[in-house]
Image (cartoon, grey):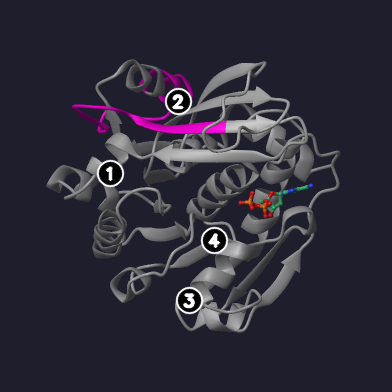
Amino acid sequence: MAPRIVVAGSANMDLVGLAERLPLPGETVLGDDFVMMPGGKGANQATAAARAGGDSVFLGAIGSDAFGVTLHARLSAAGVDVSHMRTSYGASGVAVIMVDHAGENSILVSPGANSAFTDLTEAEARLIAGGDVLLCQLEIPVATVTAACQAARAGGARTVLNAAPARELPTELLAAVDLLVVNELEAQTIAGSERPDVAALLALVPRVVLTLGSAGARYADRDGRDETVPAFPVEPTDTTAAGDAFTGALAVAWGEGRDLMEAVRWANAAGAACVRKLGASNALPTRDEIDGIYNS
Ligand code: ADP
């Protein structure tokens, strides 16, 4: 049976405008292409988990605007259970992204409904407790992430925290995290160190996965395991959402009861499948695509 992955997190509409160069403060620049795509780390990772073969449930909040309708439709078309998602009166979360021809970007995130995802309801807590794995990120209020991890603990579900965007983490939250997933920059912020210090992270949580981009990922735990699993060699096209593909797949593999080192290897295949394709949430790979790279 597919493992039940409950994702408590954000949903955003990404509004992406391309221009020859980014406007300076107060300046208007005529751009060229414009695209709109569903994003937010929570929604992306819920989609990644569903595509990777998980029974994926999304808990989060969309606004009462047209973006909310699209976000709902996209998640549900991806096979994510959105029946417990909240709709709050007002704006959905939006990311306004400007990209220049050299690939440089400026991003403004307006959290909208995501910041209204507070005070976990009893029904939400029950759902989390009944899942196999709870997966969270840090684009919703940290008190909600903490309450979700505590509900998972109380019900015997495993907790995975992808600490992005990185910030200092409260002790109550750290105490309820089974596995921390971070990239190198996030690791530095959380450990408060100049370089990614895995030992410092293991003083905070029992298991750590450090993603290393084209170098793959490193797994370390308090039992003394510490290994780097190399990435699958692929021709990268666009690394957007690679971390989301990786984390969603990792949660599914762990929920299936696979050994974490093997789960990391499989998640590397998901990350590699994602970077081969142009785009963000639309580039999140299916289970067949992941297995194709994993078995290659
Ligand atoms: P983030 O995007 O969150 O910073 P990373 O860049 O570390 O995360 O990428 C996440 C995962 O995606 C990596 O651990 C790796 O498995 C995969 N990945 C990223 N870039 C590449 C690449 N160029 N080739 C193969 N796999 C990659």
Tell me which segment is drawn in magenta.
72-97
Q: CA distance from mark 3 to mark 2?
A: 32 Å
Q: CA distance from mark 1 to mark 4?
A: 23 Å
Q: CA distance from mark 3 to mark 1?
A: 29 Å
Q: CA distance from mark 3 to mark 4?
A: 12 Å
Q: Residue lying farthest front?
A: 26
Q: Which mark is residue 181?
A: 4
State the SS at label 1.
helix
Residue type at tag 4: Val
Q: Mark 1 against mark 4, which lies toward the viewer? A: 1
What residue do we see at 70% from left, 55% from top? 265
First of labels 4, 2 by sequence position = 2
First of labels 3, 1 by sequence position = 1
Circle 3 crowding by C-alpha within 10 Å: few under 14, some 14–19, many from 20: some
Q: Which mark is residue 243?
A: none
First of labels 3, 4 by sequence position = 4
Q: CA distance from mark 2 to mark 1?
A: 25 Å
Location of residue 276 with respect to 180 vertically, above or below: above
* Rendering coords of residue 274 (x, y %): 69, 37
From the image, tell me which residue sits under label 2: 79
State the SS at label 2.
loop
Circle 4 crowding by C-alpha within 10 Å: few under 14, some 14–19, many from 20: many
Location of residue 63 with respect to 247 vertically, above or below: above
